[in-house]
Image (tube, helix red, strand yellow):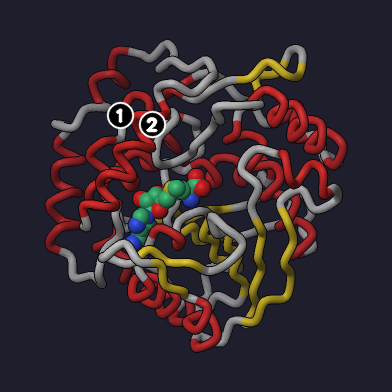
């Protein structure tokens, strides 16, 4: 990886320590503390297997993954940046108010949140722990509800590519009791954490974590939807093409993508930006819905936490 990317990510991480917001590992049981270490044989094994597995040119994550603090994996890190130097409280209030207004299924009441694993918590709604994990997930779920015409009892089957610690899988399976989410990732630490986190949240029976070197276990016809949230922007174009090949092979017709920015930028090995837009076309995906995260208000969209565009494709 280029020195420019290493310096940029080092600065990003260092700046995170000075950002506002309350965060702690939370009260963890001794067995969880013991499990979440770099020496855990399950993680060591995954890392060795991922290094050996044939793959396209990898992302900056080969370097970043070693800096994830395992007991604070929901913290201000590469999975979810949560605070700003200015107006963070205002942004959370605005985003929480927007979420409350569109929350027809009352997910803010039913999806629970706590302070575990370093997540930053915000006291903007009395009696409710608010985090970016919770708000982003609810907004993504309502986008999917409209895009796919979902009901609470929909039997949705999702393949989450670049699933991180399993944030969306946890939330989707709580919002849709009949749903099933398969998580996969090209980074061993992410696979290790999602496997742990989904068990921790009692979601293991309606989720599955498939390691990168076992992708051949995925079966065509088993998925309604593939998702990629805040991941492909950090990948090379060759790696995005690799995943789109898998999505096509698995016969998945619907694709939900949330890029970091409005477009389809990739991050190449020499730290230049590329684009995966031609790959979407080449794989037969047409964009059928494109809307800002807080699309009902330009004011909220401008000042919400991590403004993003939601994009939905079909083939
Ligand atoms: C910013 S995190 C987002 C995680 C998750 N999608 C979420 O929204 O909470 C980026 C994710 O992309 C994954 N990733 C990095 N390089 C990848 C690659 N080449 N293929 C698939 N996933 C990758 C990382 O392991 C990480 O889980």
116 over 299 or under it: above or below:
above
Question: For this view, does 8 lie left or right of residue 104?
Answer: left
Q: Nearer the viewer, residue 257 or 192?
A: 257
Residue 73: give its label.
2
21 over 308 or under it: above or below:
above
Q: Residue at x 52, y 75 (%)?
A: 221
Q: Quadrant of the N terminus?
A: bottom left
Q: Quadrant of the C terminus?
A: bottom right
Query: Pointer 2 and pointer 1: residues touching (CB < 8 Å)?
Result: yes
Question: For this view, does 269 lie left or right of residue 314?
Answer: left
Residue 166 point in image, percent of width and height: 46, 43
The secondary element bearing badge 2 is classed as loop
Question: For this view, does 42 lie left or right of residue 16?
Answer: left
User: To which residue does mark 1 refer?
Assistant: 69
Alpha carbon distance from label 2 to label 1: 6 Å
Q: Residue at x 33, y 43 (%)?
A: 9
Q: Residue at x 48, y 67 (%)?
A: 265
Q: Residue at x 42, y 46 (%)?
A: 164
Name the image quarter holding residue 53. bottom left
Residue 111 point in image, percent of width and height: 67, 31
Residue 153: give its label.
none
Q: Nearer the viewer, residue 205 or 107?
A: 107
Q: Nearer the viewer, residue 300 or 217?
A: 300
Name the image quarter holding residue 175. top right
């Amino acid at each position: 990886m280029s020195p420019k990317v290493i310096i940029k990510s080092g600065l990003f991480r260092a700046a995170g320590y000075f950002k506002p917001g309350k965060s702690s590992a939370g009260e963890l049981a001794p067995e969880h503390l013991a499990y979440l270490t770099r020496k855990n044989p399950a993680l060591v094994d995954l890392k060795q297997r991922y290094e050996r597995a044939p793959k396209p040119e990898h992302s900056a994550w080969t370097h970043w993954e070693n800096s994830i603090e395992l007991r604070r994996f929901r913290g201000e890190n590469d999975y979810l940046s949560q605070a700003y130097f200015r107006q963070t409280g205002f942004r959370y209030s605005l985003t929480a108010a927007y979420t409350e207004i569109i929350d027809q299924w009352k997910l803010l009441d039913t999806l629970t949140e706590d302070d575990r694993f370093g997540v930053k918590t915000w006291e903007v709604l009395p009696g409710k722990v608010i985090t970016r994990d919770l708000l982003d997930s609810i907004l993504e779920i309502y986008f999917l509800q409209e895009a796919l015409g979902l009901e609470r009892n929909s039997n949705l089957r999702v393949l989450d590519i670049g699933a991180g610690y399993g944030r969306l899988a946890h939330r989707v399976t709580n919002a849709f009791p009949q749903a099933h989410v398969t998580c996969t990732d090209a980074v061993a630490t992410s696979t290790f954490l999602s496997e742990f986190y989904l068990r921790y949240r009692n979601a293991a029976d309606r989720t599955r974590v498939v390691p990168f070197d076992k992708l051949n276990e995925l079966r065509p016809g088993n998925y309604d939807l593939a998702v990629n949230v805040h991941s492909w922007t950090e990948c090379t174009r060759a790696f995005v093409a690799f995943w789109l090949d898998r999505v096509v092979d698995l016969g998945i017709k619907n694709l939900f993508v949330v890029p970091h920015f409005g477009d389809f930028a990739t991050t190449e090995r020499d730290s230049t930006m590329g684009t995966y837009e031609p790959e979407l076309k080449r794989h037969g995906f047409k964009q059928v819905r494109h809307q800002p995260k807080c699309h009902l208000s330009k004011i909220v969209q401008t000042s919400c936490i991590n403004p993003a565009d939601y994009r939905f494709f079909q083939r």
